[in-house]
Image (cartoon, rainbow, N blue to C red):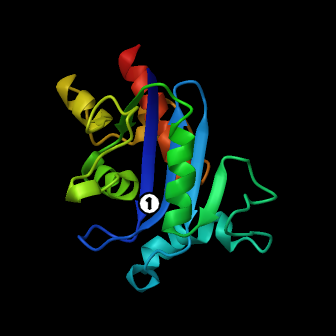
Amino acid sequence: MAKIFFDSEFTGLHQKTTLVSLGFVSDDGQKFYGEFTDYDVSQVDEWLMENVIKNLFQHSPSAEYGDLMLPDYPDYTYVGDTEFIREKLLKWFTQFDKVELWSDCLSFDWVLLSELIANRDNGYPKLPDNFVYHSPFDIVTVLKMRGLDYDVTREEFAGLKANGRKHNALWDAEVIKACYERLMA
């Protein structure tokens, strides 16, 4: 079973938030990074602009959108609207026989991801067939259950240096993976 670690960036901690980016890394190193072009820009505040939006690939002058992957970036990077990212992500998940998802603290990440990928036949959300569980796991709970500081800086806990990449969904997914590996060692 593939363990897949994920993170998202979104326009705020509120009910009408919209996805800005998603990052995934599997336990065997497969990656997916998607940036949304249709997030609600009216919800972007100064902090989000400085820490998330300005670091997106789509603000690069060489970025291309739609069916094309970005020419100057890794082949696991996609930029497009919600439906485009959804299609690419669902296709990416098919490479795994069985999937177990892990996040940092899933309150928003899981709700936004499940809304994105779930098939809503008959009004009931149905996740992809290879998802073993109907909800992911999170490292915050594992930290707390082990009596550790669940508010610790994740890079510090994992022994990594952020190098200015904090609040990039793919980097954060890699940090979550490193935290998980340390917790399970």
Residue 151 is situated, as x and y percent measured from the top left of the image, at 28, 43
* Residue position marked by numbered label 1 in the rendering: 9
Q: Nearer the viewer, residue 152 or 142?
A: 142
Residue shown at 21% from the left, 53% from the top: 124
Q: Nearer the viewer, residue 55 or 115?
A: 115
Where disc 1 sits, the SS reads strand
**Image quarter of the N terminus:** top left
Q: Is residue 75 left or right of residue 19?
A: right
Residue 125 is situated, as x and y percent measured from the top left of the image, at 26, 52
The residue carrying pointer 1 sits among few (fewer than 14), some (14 to 19) or many (20 or more) residues within 10 Å by Cα, namely many
Residue 61 is situated, as x and y percent measured from the top left of the image, at 78, 74
Residue 66 is situated, as x and y percent measured from the top left of the image, at 67, 68
Residue shown at 26% from the left, 30% from the top: 143
- Residue 5 visible, this angle: yes
Q: Is residue 134 left or right of residue 84?
A: left
Q: Amino acid at mark 1?
A: Glu
Q: In which quarter of the view is residue 127 placed?
A: top left
**Above or below, 17 relative to 131:** below
